[in-house]
Image: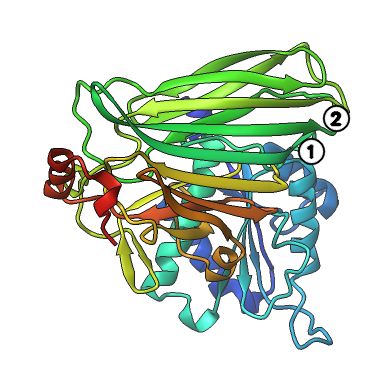
Amino acid sequence: MSATKKNQLLFFSRSFDQTDAVVNDFFAAIAAGLEINLSDIGYGSPQAPIEKCRDLIASAGGVFVVAVRRTPLKNGRFAMPDACRDEIGMAYGLRKPIVIFCEDGVEVEGFAKHYGTRQTFSRIDLHKPNHIRDTIRAIRELYLKVIGDFPIQTDMMRADIYSEGTKLLADLRRDSKGWFWELIVKKRLIFNEDLNQPLTDGTWASSAIAVPESAPRILFSINPLESSRKFKLTPSLRRHTALLVDCVTSVSPKPKKGDWLEYEAKSQSRYLNPLVMEDLLSRDSPYVIGGKQYFCLEGLVPVQLTEKLEIELRFERGYPIHKSSPCMVSGPHSNSLDRLDTEETARMVCTERDTIGGETRVRTLVHKPRQNYLYGIAWNPLPTDSLDKAHASGTGNAEARS
């Protein structure tokens, strides 16, 4: 990591009303505790405020906004300060990563789906442990995107491309060497403008899994399928380990406005998800859904604006899991699933849940997935003896567990 990146500023968009000083000090103190440098317009600037803001936002790596209550609205809610709204617009125009902390009651219609991560806070609960944890996580996520330590860099702020359809197939398979996971992400990209940056792709293990030092790196490839004209895809792996692939892919010739491209990114590894409980580094369940604990989650955080997202989880015959066990999951994502969003999860339609020829399949579909959200399917790994017994008897999914 270079020193320049480490010292990258975040622009702090906030109210300067003295009644909001306690709120501003709270968020600024957390940033200081994370050793993150902030900039803001301040008082007495010789430049016009709009010009000063634009310069500071342009030079910052990202923007975090504290949107307090300001003008009462007819619907009983409140507008945020005009300056915050203007600064959000500038940041969006400059394609800067944004996180917005909204005081409860602040109207955010028009921001929720287009302007990055958003969290709500209450002044009376400002110093409660859960809120402090969520605030630290959100600011840290923003900063990791700026300095490049976020697992996969995203294209959410780009206007030149969007995905007409993205599909994830997570397939647990077996060969002569044993079990392994194969993840295939298929995309159909539409170019709204001439392509001006590489494409981003990648994968990482979402569960805390024990990996031996001798574990090989994830097998990863990019394969073109169909396109409006012939393109060559050249992947470049920025990070490549047994648990993570972060890839940028150049396209030549550069796609023009109106072009389209369909391609697959394929990953293979034994360690992308746990097979048995003994693979887990911790027995503390990271996900509680409907009162039930889950230890595994496979899904996708869309890295481009996406029209339709489909996810399929498939277990080959011989892995005794019942078709009713996996469940749909969605929620905001930083370096992990931050929380379960029940409303967004309800938008995920289960289109298949079946066992065919001993193979269990679960499939889900969601239209217009949200930015910085993970969509996936959760399940639990088996006890080692259950998998051993299935192998010994050869029954596999014919004796699946519920």
Q: Which mark is residue 159?
A: 1
The reply to whether residue 31 is visible in this rendering is no
Q: Please, what is the three-letter code of the amino acid marked with disc 2?
A: Glu
Near mark 2 (Cα within 10 A), the count class, few <14, some 14-19 or many ≥20, is some
Which structural element holds mark 2? Answer: loop
Q: Where in the figure is residue 51, as x and y percent of width and height? A: 84, 47
Kindly identify the residue that appears in the image at 76 percent across and 21 percent down: 227
Kindly identify the residue that appears in the image at 44 percent across and 58 percent down: 136
Q: Nearer the viewer, residue 112 or 360?
A: 360
Which residue lies under the disc numbered 2?
A: 193
Q: Where in the figure is residue 361, as x and y percent of width and height? A: 45, 48
To which quarter of the image does residue 268 belong? top left
Q: Where in the figure is residue 108, as x and y percent of width and height? A: 73, 69
343, above or below 167, in the image: below
How was the colour assigned to the protein in this rendering?
Answer: rainbow
Q: Residues under labels 2 and 1: Cα distance?
A: 8 Å
Q: Nearer the viewer, residue 69 or 314?
A: 314
Q: Where in the figure is residue 99, as x and y percent of width and height? A: 61, 55
Quadrant of the snapshot with the C terminus? bottom left
Q: Please, what is the three-letter code of the amino acid marked with disc 1?
A: Ala
211, above or below 402, in the image: above
Which structural element holds mark 1? Answer: loop
Kindly identify the residue that appears in the image at 88 percent across and 27 percent down: 257
State if disc 1 and disc 2 touch (CB < 8 Å). yes
